[in-house]
Amino acid sequence: MKEIHHLHSWDVGYHEAVALQNHLKDRLILTDTDETETVTLIAGADISYARGSRLFFAVVVVLEFPSLVPVEKASHMAEVNFPYIPGLLSFRECPPLLAAFEKLTRTPDVVLFDGHGIAHPRGIGLASHMGLILDCPAIGCAKTRLFGTHGDVPAIPGDYAPLMKDHAVIGAVLRTKKNVRPIFVSIGHRIGLSRSVDIVMKSCRGYRLPEPTRQAHLAVNELRRDYYRQSL
């Protein structure tokens, strides 16, 4: 992985974290910065932890694109001290995820995160925060809504309803599979919404979740189960 630029300390309290979000969101690039570049490597990242535990597990899976053949996986586990506060989850999840990214030998062209991008109360969720630090195109692919409103979602896979904040579009409530609940796609950093939706759909292989985050989800939960089995 190319050099990661750590933009701030993670040893912060509530008010400092909110101030950092309000400062960093102005640095986000919400359009395609490399649309002429061919995506050959795509990554998915996810976090897992036992309820009530401070021990977090992070996994990043890198796949070739568009074949989605896995080529690399990196993981990390660490104790996290930042409390659970809705809207500030990146201050819990970013540090172990960044440690996993630092172990990669390849640099992905785009990263999908199991979390939100700008579809967030202050406009900077996990995917946006990580995208800024990694300085790469990042997409939020969340399983549930955090922020915004939307209408009915079309039934055809690939169609979506816009996720709105007032009169602004902040994401897409995307149907990835027929008769299955949609996912919430939002811009993280250095990519537009149309291209985000296109990449997510091209990363789906018959499941609700796109393959990069699905593979990361499976791997990180297996890592957590293995750790606790060995601890018995």
Image: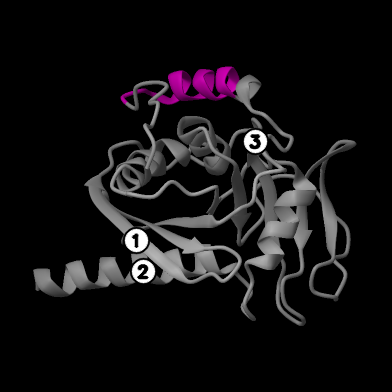
The image position of residue 185, as x and y in percent, is 69, 54
**Residue to which mark 2 is pinned:** 219
Amino acid at pointer 3 = Arg
Label 3 crowd (10 A; few <14 / some 14-19 / many >=20) = many
Secondary structure type for disc 3: loop
Instruction: Tell me the distance, in whole angstroms, between the alpha carbons under discs 2 and 3.
Output: 27 Å
Whether residue 129 sits left or right of residue 92 in the image: it is right
Q: Earlier in the sequence, mark 2 or mark 1?
A: 1
Secondary structure type for disc 2: helix
Front in this rendered view, residue 61 or 155:
61
Residue range highlighted in magenta: 11-24
Residue at x 74% of width, y 56% of height: 197
Residue at x 68% of width, y 34% of height: 33
Residue at x 51% of width, y 69% of height: 214
Label 2 crowd (10 A; few <14 / some 14-19 / many >=20) = many
Placement of 199 over or under 227, stated as above or below: above
**Residue to which mark 1 is pinned:** 73
**Residue to which mark 3 is pinned:** 190
The image position of residue 145, as x and y in percent, is 67, 54
Question: Residue 4's image quarter?
Answer: top left
Please identify the dominant SS of the magenta region.
helix
Circles 2, 1 touching at the beta carbon (< 8 Å): yes
Quadrant housing the C terminus? bottom left
